[in-house]
Image: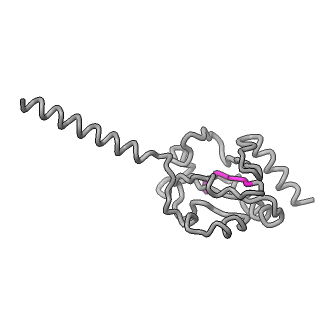
Amino acid sequence: MNARLRAMACLSASVFVLTMLGACSKDEPVEDLAVAKIPVAELQSTGYLPLNADKPGTFVEVEKYLVPGKYTLVAYFSPFDGVFAGLEPRLVQLAQARPDIAVRTVNINRPEVQGIDWQSPVLGDLGITKLPYFQIFDPAQSLRAQARPAYEQVAQWVQSLSN
C-alpha cells in the first residue's frame, strides 16, 4: 500500500510540475514591460518605439503595439549586430519623416549573453536565422512581409530618405 501511495504522490507531483512548466512557456509575453504602461493614444502617436528596452531578451507580443492606420515595421535585433547598429539611426529618421510608418524594435539579447543570442526566447517560433529581422504590418494590422522581402522594403524606405 505504501508503494502505491508513493507512486500516486510521485505522479501527482509530476503532473503539477509539468502543468507549471507549461504555464511558464517561453513564448508568453512579459506583461510588466514599461511599454505596456504607456497609454494607447501615446503608443499610437509614437513613431519609433523600443518595445523591450527595459527588459531586453524578453518575449513581446508585438501585435499589441501595432498602429492602426499606419504601416508598422517591427525590427528584431541584437546590439551585437553591426548591421542594425548602422541602420537604427535611419529607422528613427524614417519614423520621423514618414507619418504613415511606425517603427517598433525588439532586442533579442538577454543581458547575460555576449554576442548574438540565438537561444533567445524572443526568437520563439519565428524561425529567425539572420539579423536584423523585419516584419511589416499594413494599416489594417495584417502581416504583409517578413524576412528578406521585408528587409528589401525597409532598404527602399531608408533609401528614399536620401532622395
Most distant residue in the left direction: 1
Q: Nearer the viewer, residue 82 or 46?
A: 46
Q: Position of residue 47 (x, y in %)?
A: 73, 65
Q: Position of residue 33 (x, y in %)?
A: 52, 63
Residue 119 on the magenta span: no
Residue ID at (49%, 56%): 30
Q: How many marks?
A: 0
Residue ID at (70%, 47%): 135
Q: Position of residue 63 (x, y in %)?
A: 63, 52
Main structural element of the magenta stretch: helix, strand or loop? strand
- Left or right, 13 with respect to 54, comes to left
Residue ID at (66%, 66%): 43
21 lies above or below 73? above
Most distant residue in the right direction: 163
Specify start and end residues of the magenta stretch as a single range.
72-80
Q: Position of residue 141 (x, y in %)?
A: 71, 50
- Left or right, 43 with respect to 150, comes to left
